[in-house]
Structures are given as structure tokens and as C-alpha cells.
């Protein structure tokens, strides 16, 4: 049986005041903010490699016009819906985490996304409380007060009309032709929805990851910050319900770092695995895995939230309209309220300048993808072993919920309508699925169920909740139930999924915990 304490552990590798596990969207921010104070000390442990010099970044990490899928990835797979085959489920394995491989869409959630968290008994997470941190993290190059920040680490801008590739410009025109309003700034909390440019953390085509923006040369020079890449945290060591260290592995060598405080920022897939290997999770699951119980926390890994998506594909009518090597994948989006929804602007439609079907297969076709912002369905993560090298089974259950599926069908019907407007019809014609499928709701429903995929926004796997809430794993400041000195701060703690892409929310979480940990408030 795996026991979680120092006495049963490998050789010591020093000590640290605060260990942050994972240098991704949240972890990189936390390390940078905590070490602003010279009397705080952070050891930042990251499983992936580090590229401290932006000039030396590999091309897949520098290029913000498309995702990096394989070169810096954990190699996870998931089953989107019960009948489907396994698909890639990318997660960044590098300093910068998933922010270093993502699509650079920089959208905040809408006020109700965070007010919903407050209504669950987490008053510190309402929109008004989060807004100062969204502003602090950004340098919005287009808009200012009262909703936007200037001079923060992450530059954000929107493509101008003249920068749009033909398909993206036609999408805006097509939506306008159908009467959708124009939306210049999706991050304005009063935005009524509509079509416009995406806010993006991409400058001159380069991705502005949490690593580039927060772990700058200046921050790295701080003597109170130690960054140890290529180091995997196997588990947290706990004695008498108090953290006493972390067990780490570098190049096959297993060591222990002594510490009284650990922040898990390993992301929504890895964080629950570390908790389980540390003896924190559902009692029965720990027994099945052969891990000695430290704290019975049923909510660890019990739910997986994610955005379901689906896309239609169109073939260009003329040569030269698509340049898969040079054109940016996304530039614009339409946001609208789905039928009968209590959440305004809960669905996004997004044109893709080309069709990345698989890392090794980019189709020179146009796409229009939908993203269901407030899905009701939930997935789960299944751990088959306590081996730190074993990958969990990710069961996404996307669109299993009938309402979610119906919204996806509505969304692609709208995509079909937009694609038939004059500006778009001039550029492309339908290839995927066949038009006869697009015209028949039942056929479209069956097709979407078979072809839908993840928005790559997993969250909610170690959710926050108030005292006494059995569906929560941590309290409103990320403190793990029943273990002193252990905090979770990443996308895992989101109690409900925000209606949009999750990176800015993960950075905002990092900002908040960075401040709390720096000021001794956690
Ligand atoms: C392909 C892709 C495209 C996306 N596109 C967008 C987008 O355009 N806009 C958007 O808003 N969101 C996007 N997202 C989602 C967004 O990037 C994530 O929600 C966000 O980065 C999550 O932040 P995090 O801090 O929770 O986790 P991560 O950023 O994933 O950080 C976790 C870190 O922990 C490390 N780690 C994990 N386990 C261990 C361990 N045992 N020991 C040591 N280190 C460990 C990982 O290597 C990683 O660096 C995308 C994600 C992907 C993968």
C-alpha cells in the first residue's frame, strides 16, 4: 500500500518554504506574484521543459496562430461521447502549461459566470471581486477603463478589419446580414453579444503565454524563486493531516523536498491524480487504488466539466483563399443566447480559417465551429492505478445531455444559415457533413453526436465550495478539506464552467492566489 508520509520516502532533496506544482496558467502567475515579496520563497516544479529565452522558443510554442498539439503535450486521450473512438486531449507539458500551446483566445467569462460561484456560497468569487484581477493581468491595447487594464503582464488585442482573412471577414458580414449586432469588445461585461473580433493574447502572430508574460528574465533573476523544470511531482507527503513534503521525480530519480506548504496548480486533469496518490479523495477509490487514506474527499475527480463543440466544413470555391501555413486559425466569433437559456450569450460560433482535424492532418477547408458555453452534462476522470506515470481515463460525456445536444444542433443550423449568406456563399460550399444532413434536424443530431469534440477547457475536478458542501473538494481559498498546508489553485477549482474559453479565468485565479499567498492570507 502507498503511504503518504516522509518516513516511508526516498532521499531528501532540500527544503522549500512554498512549493508550487505546475508552471501553467495559474502556477506561473502564482510564482511570479508571491516572489514580489523578497521575504517569500517559492520552489516552482514543472514536469515539462523550460525555455527561458523567448528568442529560443521552439516554433510550436512561438506560433500563436494555431495550437501546438504534440511537441509539448501529456499524451492524454479522451472519449468525447460514449460511442466514439478515442481522441487526443491536449494539455501543455512545458513551463507555461496549456497557455503555452493554446489558441490565444483571451475572453473573460460573463458576470453571471462568477456571480454563480458567489451564489454557491463563495462570496469572494463574484464578478465584482474578480474584475480587479482580470484588469491587473492584462495590458489591453484597444480598450481602457472602466473594464480594462493597462500595463499588466498579458498583452491583449483584437484583429482590425483589414487584418481579417477573407473567410473571417465574410463571417462577420454574413452574421451582420442576418441581423446580428456588431460586438467590438467581447470582454466588456455589458456586451450584448453579436459578432466581432476575438480578444487575443497574440502579438505579431506570437503566443503570449503565462511563461512569457509572467516568468520574465527580471522575475527569473529573483533569488527567492527557484524553477525546476523536467521534474514531476508524484505525490504530496502528509503526516497527521499536515503537509510535510512532496515526492518528486527527475530523469527517473525519486527524491523528496521537505515543505510545510504546497500549492497544486497542475491543471484540471493532473491535480486530482496528485491528490489521489497523496491519499486525498473518495475513500472507496483510494482503497481500490491501494493508497492509504489521508482525507476522505468524495469530490476529488468526481466531475469533469468541459465545453462540447462541433464544426461544419466548407470547401473553398477558388484557389488561394486558404493558406494553412500562414493564416491565423481564429480571428472572429459570434455570441448569441441559445433557445430558452437562462444564460445570455451562452453559445459561441467561430469560423476557422482552415480545418485542423488532427495534428498531422490539416484540411484546406473552411470551418464554422460551435462551442456550448454552459453545458449541463458532466464527465469524469477514472484512475486505473496509483502509478504516477499512468494516464487516467478521461470520460467526457459531451452532448449526452439532451439539452446540450439540442443547443449544438441549433448552433450548427445557425452556422449553416450563416454559410448560405451571400458573403460566405461566394467563398465556400458544403462538404462536411453533406447538405442533406444539415437540412434534416434528426440526421444532424445523429451526426453531431458522432463527431463532436472537446473545447479543451477541462475544469471543476476539485471544485471550491463553502464549509459543509460535500460536492466540494476545497474551500473558497483553495484549501483542501482535512489537510493543513495544501492548497489547489488552477482550473480544477472552478465550481461551474465559465461560458467561454478558460485561460483568462485560470490566469485570474493565479492572480488571486498569488496575492493571497504573498500576503499570508492563505
Ligand atoms: C490546445 C488547447 C487550446 C486551448 N485554447 C484556449 C484558448 O484559445 N483560450 C482559452 O481561454 N483557453 C484555451 N485553452 C484552455 C486553457 O489554456 C486552460 O484552461 C488553462 O491553461 C488551464 O490552466 P491551468 O493552470 O489550470 O493548467 P495548465 O496551464 O495546463 O498548467 C498545468 C501545469 O502543470 C504541469 N504539471 C502537471 N502535472 C504535473 C506534475 N505531476 N508535476 C509537475 N508539473 C505538473 C503541466 O505540465 C502544466 O505546465 C486551450 C487549451 C488547450 C490544451
Image (tube, grey):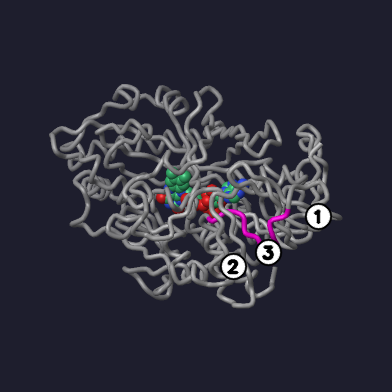
Query: Residue at coordinates 45% horizontally, 32% vertically from top-left?
Result: 452
Depth check, mark 3 against mark 1: the one in front is 3
Q: Earlier in the sequence, mark 3 or mark 1?
A: 3
- Look at the image and give the residue range highlighted in magenta: 12-23
Mark 2 → mark 1, Cα distance in angstroms: 22 Å
Name the residue tied to disc 1: 482
Pick the residue in front: 99 or 135: 99
Sort mark 2 into few (<14), some (14-19) or many (20+) by Cα contacts within 10 Å. many
Q: Residue at x 34, y 70 (%)?
A: 143
Neighbours of disc 3 within 10 Å: few (<14), some (14-19), many (20+): some
Q: In the image shown, does 348 or 178 lie closer to the viewer?
A: 348
Q: Which residue is mark 2?
A: 514
Which quarter of the figure is the C terminus placed in? bottom right
Q: Which residue is disc 3 drawn over? A: 16
The N terminus: image quadrant? top right
Q: Secondary structure at mark 3?
A: loop
Where, by quadrant of the figure, is residue 444 drawn? top left
The crowd level at tag 1 (other Cα within 10 Å; few <14, some 14-19, many 20+) is some
Location of residue 53 by image quarter: bottom left
Amino acid at each position: 500500500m502507498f503511504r503518504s508520509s516522509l518516513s516511508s520516502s526516498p532521499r531528501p532533496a532540500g527544503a522549500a518554504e512554498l512549493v508550487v506544482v505546475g508552471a501553467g496558467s495559474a502556477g506561473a502567475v502564482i510564482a511570479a506574484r508571491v516572489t514580489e515579496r523578497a521575504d517569500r520563497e517559492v520552489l516552482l516544479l514543472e514536469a515539462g521543459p523550460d525555455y527561458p529565452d523567448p528568442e529560443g522558443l521552439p516554433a510550436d510554442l512561438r506560433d500563436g496562430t494555431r495550437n501546438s498539439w504534440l511537441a509539448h503535450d501529456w499524451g492524454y486521450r479522451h472519449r468525447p461521447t460514449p460511442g466514439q473512438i478515442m481522441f487526443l486531449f491536449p494539455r501543455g507539458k512545458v513551463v507555461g502549461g496549456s497557455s503555452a500551446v493554446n489558441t490565444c483566445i483571451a475572453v473573460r467569462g460573463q458576470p453571471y459566470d462568477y456571480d454563480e460561484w458567489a451564489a454557491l456560497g463563495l462570496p469572494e468569487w463574484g464578478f465584482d471581486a474578480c474584475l480587479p484581477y482580470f484588469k491587473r493581468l492584462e495590458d489591453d491595447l484597444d480598450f481602457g477603463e472602466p473594464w480594462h487594464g493597462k500595463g499588466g503582464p498579458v498583452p491583449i488585442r483584437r484583429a482590425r478589419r483589414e487584418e481579417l482573412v477573407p473567410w473571417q471577414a465574410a463571417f462577420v458580414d454574413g452574421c451582420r446580414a442576418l441581423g446580428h449586432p456588431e460586438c467590438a469588445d467581447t470582454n466588456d461585461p455589458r456586451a450584448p453579444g453579436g459578432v466581432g473580433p476575438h480578444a487575443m493574447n497574440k502579438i505579431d502572430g506570437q503566443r503570449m503565454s503565462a511563461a512569457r508574460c509572467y516568468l520574465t528574465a527580471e522575475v527569473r533573476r529573483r533569488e527567492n524563486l527557484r524553477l525546476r523544470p523536467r521534474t514531476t511531482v508524484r505525490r504530496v507527503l502528509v503526516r497527521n493531516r499536515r503537509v510535510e513534503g512532496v515526492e518528486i521525480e527527475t530523469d527517473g530519480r525519486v527524491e523528496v523536498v521537505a515543505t510545510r506548504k504546497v500549492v497544486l496548480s497542475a491543471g484540471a486533469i493532473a491535480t486530482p491524480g496528485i491528490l489521489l496518490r497523496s491519499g486525498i479523495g473518495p475513500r472507496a477509490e483510494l482503497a481500490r487504488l491501494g493508497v492509504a487514506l489521508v482525507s476522505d474527499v468524495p469530490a476529488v475527480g468526481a466531475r469533469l466539466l468541459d465545453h462540447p463543440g462541433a464544426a461544419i466544413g466548407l470547401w473553398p470555391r477558388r484557389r488561394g483563399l486558404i493558406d494553412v501555413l500562414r493564416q491565423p486559425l481564429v480571428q472572429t466569433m459570434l455570441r448569441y443566447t441559445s433557445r430558452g437559456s437562462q444564460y445570455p450569450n451562452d453559445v459561441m460560433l467561430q469560423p476557422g480559417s482552415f480545418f485542423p482535424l488532427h495534428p498531422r492532418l490539416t484540411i484546406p477547408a473552411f470551418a464554422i465551429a460551435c462551442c456550448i458555453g454552459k453545458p449541463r452534462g458532466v464527465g469524469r476522470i477514472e484512475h486505473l492505478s496509483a502509478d504516477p506515470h499512468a494516464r487516467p481515463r478521461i470520460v467526457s460525456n459531451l452532448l449526452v445531455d439532451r439539452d446540450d445536444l439540442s443547443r449544438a444542433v441549433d448552433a450548427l443550423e445557425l452556422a449553416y444559415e450563416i454559410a448560405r449568406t451571400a458573403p460566405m456563399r461566394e467563398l465556400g460550399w458544403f462538404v462536411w457533413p453533406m447538405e442533406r444532413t444539415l437540412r434534416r434536424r434528426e440526421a444532424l443530431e445523429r451526426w453531431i453526436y458522432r463527431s463532436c469534440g472537446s473545447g479543451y477547457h477541462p475544469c471543476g475536478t476539485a471544485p471550491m465550495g463553502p464549509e459543509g458542501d460535500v460536492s466540494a473538494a476545497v474551500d473558497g481559498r483553495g484549501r483542501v478539506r482535512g489537510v493543513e498546508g495544501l492548497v489547489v489553485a488552477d482550473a480544477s477549482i472552478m465550481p461551474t464552467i465559465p461560458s467561454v474559453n478558460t485561460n483568462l479565468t485560470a490566469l485570474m485565479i493565479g492572480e488571486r492566489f498569488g496575492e493571497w499567498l504573498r500576503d499570508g492570507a492563505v
